[in-house]
Image (spheres, rainbow, N blue to C red):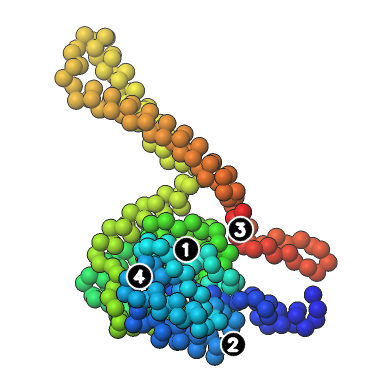
Amino acid sequence: MNHLLSSQLANTTLTTPEAVYLSVVVPIYNEAESLSKLIEAIATTLRENQLKYEIICVDDGSQDGSTEILRQIAHSRTDFKAVILRRNYGQTPAMAAGFKQAQGKVIVTLDGDLQNDPEDIPQLLAKLEEGYDLVSGWRKDRQDAALTRLLPSKIANWMIGIVTGVKLHDYGCSLKAYRSELVDDMNLYGELHRFLPALAYIEGARIAELPVRHHARRYGTSKYGLGRTFRVLMDLFTVFFMKKFLTRPMHVFGLFGLSAIVLGTFLGLYLTFLKLGLGQSIGDRPLLILAVLLVFTGVQLFSFGLLAELLMRTYHESQKRPIYRIREVIVNNGSSTIKPSTINHQQ
Ligand code: UDP
Ligand code: MG
């Protein structure tokens, strides 16, 4: 490495001069009115901060002309990429498609409706540079309907906090900054994009939260209503299971299964004693039903645990996903420290 390059690297720890430093990923579903303003606002802020960036808008099957606008913008700008999906898949797949295209060392996501403020991006980046892997925005003064949006969101945030163990005020804020290794390695399903901090935390990432501005929607309409709360809750169960038992499903299924079998067997033996030893009739005893049910569900849970163990091995081994994540390897090799990426890339 020549001297010039290494001194530049020292100033900007994440970037090399020619590489894209920052990829801004924006999912777009029927946001025609805000698009040009949004992209101009992002570009202005990033240019002012002298960042090497690209903006990636993912059109998630819009029907309001957003696609054509994105196409035109892509033809007229060099800092912009439009990814057009074939139909409407939802915000999570749209973001995943953007992540796949992103070349930056850092990825910032935000909404396409101008509710997030692009001027907050430099702040998030500065925080990331302090040594975090993910910095999440916190809409401290959120401008959405109180009853249908803020209340469910408050409850959801509280539950997500308890279940995942990541203490954030606002999981739903789209404005977030990630180191790219983090998202490269994450498989997103359902509405899991809001659980990215939780999933990242499971992978051992360092996470910070920063208050950001939030504006009321001025163009278009929100794509979500109360129904989202249910989907988020279901995803929460998935995340909970992944956090606790992903690499050891037998520990949970086996525990419940074996306990049920043991309890059921004892009850069965007791009833057998009553029948054979004391000659009592046991046909009308509710205990008999309980004993049978316990043994039955116990055997099922136990075998389910074994199947889950097999599935888990397939999950990890087919994708070559290690069950651990290395942050750093330090060797005493003169003065050098070898720092592999925090997270292994998928093959
Ligand atoms: N979005 C998307 N696909 C969808 C729904 C939403 O790409 O099926 C995008 C939408 O265009 C916006 C972001 O996801 O950029 C967040 O949606 P919205 O602003 O409606 O959510 P809210 O801010 O009301 O929670
Ligand atoms: Mg919005």
Q: Earlier in the sequence, mark 1 or mark 2?
A: 2
Which residue has dot 4 on it? 62
Using the rendered image of the protein, determine whether residue 108 is visible from the camera's viewpoint: no
Dot 1 amino acid type: Ala
Q: Earlier in the sequence, mark 1 or mark 3?
A: 1
Which of the two marks, 1 or 4, is nearer to us in this view?
4
Which of the two marks, 2 or 4, is nearer to us in this view?
4
Beta carbon at label 4 within 8 Å of ligand 1: yes
Distance from Cα at disc 3 to Cα at disc 2? 29 Å
Residue found 39% across the figure and 51% down from its top: 238
Q: Is there a contact, CB below 8 Å, between mark 1 and mark 3?
A: no
Residue 112 percent across, percent down from the top left: 39, 77
Residue found 42% across the figure and 65% down from its top: 85
Which residue has dot 1 on it? 96
Residue 309 percent across, percent down from the top left: 49, 38
Query: Dot 2: what SS?
Result: loop
Q: Is there a contact, CB below 8 Å, between mark 3 and mark 2?
A: no
Q: Is there a contact, CB below 8 Å, between mark 4 and mark 3?
A: no
Q: Is residue 105 left or right of residue 170?
A: right
